[in-house]
Structures are given as C-alpha cells and as structure tokens.
Image (spheres, helix red, strand yellow):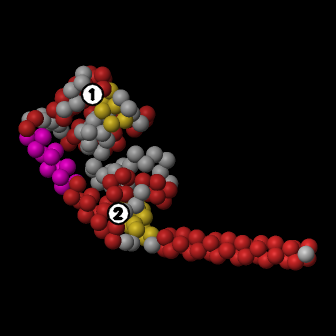
Amino acid sequence: MNVSGINQNQTTRINNQTTNSANTVNFAQQLAASQAALTTKAVTAQQGDTVWGFAQKYGSTVQQIAQKNHLQNPNLILIGQKLQVPVTNSTKTTQATQAYSVNQTTNNSNTQKSSTSSNITVPVLNKSEEEARAYIVQHESGGNYNARNGKYIGKYQLDSAYLNGDYSSANQEKVAAKYVAERYGNWENAMKHWETYSWY
C-alpha cells in the first residue's frame, strides 16, 4: 500500500510539473508573439505634439514610448525632438489612429469655433518673442487651453489664483501676457528662466 501510494504521488507531481511547463511555454510564446507584433516608427515632435498623442495615434502607450526613448519626464518633449514610437501591427492600431485623427479634427474645429465666439486676442509679437512664447507653451501644455496639473491651468499652466475663476482662452492669453510682462519683461527672458529652472 505504501509503495503504491508513493508511486501515485510521484505520478501526480510529474503531471503537475508537465502542466506547469506547458503553461510556461504557452506564456512565453504569447509574450514573444506580442513583442514581435511591435514595430517602431521614427517621429519628430512638432509644436502641439505630446507623448500621449503619439501613443493614441500609433496604438502605443505613454509608458512604452518613455521606456523606448529613456524619457525621465514623458510630459516634456521638445520641438524637433526625435522619438522612436512602438507601433502595434493590428487593426486596432488603424482604428486608434483613425479615432485620434477624428478627435484631433473635432478638437481643432471646436477650438476654432470657440476662438471665433470668444474673440481671443493673442498679442502680436516679433519673431524672437513669438518663438520664445511658443517654446514655453510647448513645454507647459502643448498648446492645450484645457490642460490641468493640480492648481496650474490651461495653455500657459498659470496658477488658478491668477485666473480668478475665468479659465476662458481669452482670459488665459490676457493673464499670461500680463504675468510675463510684469515678472520677466518679455517672453525671451521668461524662456531663459524656463531653460534654467524648467518653469517660468
């Protein structure tokens, strides 16, 4: 009886080990297949681009892009910066790209409508000032009037206290222009401060 019991236990262990090994092999095969399904696309960041936007467009994730490009802060990319974006080769990617494009078109359309209806006035600046302002906008929000980061609001990531509860695009432009003029004198000085301290 004892000998028979031991043999039965050994058989059970062997069967369990075989099943576990098979599961491990299946998992490894699935992992390899999923990794093989990823290709990489080289992109160059333009004004308004974000890591999240690239992830949505190419069926990737912010984490994958950050890891692939060794980004310490995925919320911070520069105009002209070259990135390698993992792309999933599936119909989901195409669908995600189409959805992203539709959303971007809708958002742009809504922005144009709100800009017209609220009569947003953006101060006219010389080329160097305009470039400095664009630099700050790109690094702060990517140009998104609806961006939120705790108490920092909108396109210029202004302290909510400065906006006095009025988060409209027109007020953001007005307050940002006043803030920069009073604190730095001009956008170029504000950009220099941002380059040194990563805030303005």
User: How far across and how far down the image is residue 130, in percent?
Assistant: 22, 40
Magenta residue span = 104-116
- Pointer 1: what residue? 180
Q: Amino acid at mark 2?
A: Tyr
- Pointer 2: what residue? 58
- Decide: few, some or many residues near mark 1? Use Cα within 10 Å; few <14, some 14-19, many ≥20: some
Query: Which secondary structure, mark 1?
Result: helix
User: How far across and how far down the image is residue 103, in percent?
Assistant: 23, 54
Specify the quadrant of the image occupied by residue 155: top left
Residue drawn 34% across the image and 67% down it: 92
Compute the Cα span from label 2 to label 1: 36 Å
The front one of 99 and 200 is: 99
- Eye-nearest disc, 2 or 1: 2
User: How far across and how far down the image is residue 181, in percent?
Assistant: 24, 25
Q: Is residue 82 left or right of residue 122?
A: right
Which quarter shows the N terminus? bottom right
Query: Which secondary structure, mark 2?
Result: helix
- Let me know if residue 190 is in the magenta part: no
- Decide: few, some or many residues near mark 2? Use Cα within 10 Å; few <14, some 14-19, many ≥20: many
